[in-house]
Amino acid sequence: MALGSSLALRNTKATATRDAYDAGAGPGVVRFYSGKRPPAVDDPAIPSTAWAGSTSYPVGDLVVPTTGNGHYYRATAAGTSGSSEPTWPTDGSTVTDGGVTWKDYGLVPTLLGTVTCADPCGTVSGGELTFGDFVQDSAADADGQATWARGEDSTGAAVHDYDVTATGGGGDITLNTTTIVTGGPIDITSLVITEG
């Protein structure tokens, strides 16, 4: 079922999004990452909480092994972890750890670079937030394939997560190439969020 909203409601939602990007004392940012996008915008962009034995974990908690293997894991069944660390899979499968089931969620994301929004970030009209000019990241932080991005306000509070693809790939944000090279530029030429 496709849900349609009135123009007034779409503008209200777009204005709330604009205000979320503009919260804080400075401009918002869009940070580009390699690796798998976390399951929820409220999850940390780079999970870093180390697994602990005999600990209660709710569904959705994210951990990394105590000895890093490059992957992170999401609790898909709540419970108390075992007293010794499990053998962590790296193929997308699950592992049982005491009463917790962990799913391999993929490679831990790496921050590749940060593009800065205009301040204010954009204008609202016709149920759309059209971002103003971005300030490119003229020197990317790391090498990697940009697979997702997170929009944040100036305090670091997450606003949106975006899929990133090369031009023609259908992502929320498209780049001329998703291959990011340390010291190279990252730029967004335009971004429009359409509220439905």
Image (cartoon, rainbow, N blue to C red):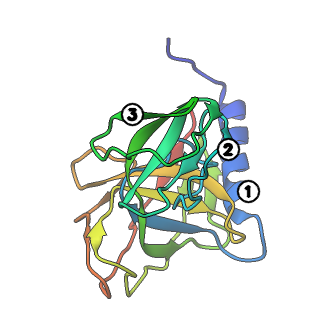
- Residue 90's place in the image compared with 6, above or below, is below
Q: Are marks 3 and 2 in contact (CB under 8 Å)?
A: no
CA gap between label 3 and label 1 equals 39 Å
- Residue at position x 69%, y 61% from top? 157
Secondary element at tag 2 = loop
Q: Earlier in the sequence, mark 3 or mark 2?
A: 2
Report the front residue among 100 and 32.
100
Q: Is residue 54 left or right of residue 145?
A: right
Instruction: Between residue 115 and residue 33, name the one nearer to us.
Output: 33
Q: Quadrant of the C terminus?
A: top right
Q: Secondary structure at mark 1?
A: helix
Please name the amino acid that badge 3 sits on. Answer: Thr
Judge left or right: residue 126 versus residue 70. right
Q: Amino acid at mark 2?
A: Thr
| Residue matched to label 3 | 94
Residue at label 1?
19
Q: Are marks 3 and 1 in contact (CB under 8 Å)?
A: no
Question: How far apart in space, not on screen, are marks 1 and 2 (Cα)?
Answer: 38 Å
Q: Label 2, on which residue?
A: 55
Give coordinates of residue 84: x percent, y percent. 52, 47
Q: At x 35% / y 79%, what residue is drawn?
A: 142
Q: Residues within 10 Å of mark 2 (few under 14, many from 20)?
A: some
Identify the element where label 3 is drawn: strand
Instruction: Say which quarter of the image contains residue 13.
Output: top right
Q: Residue 51, position in %: x, y?
A: 56, 53
* Lateral position of residue 113 relative to residue 46, left or right: left
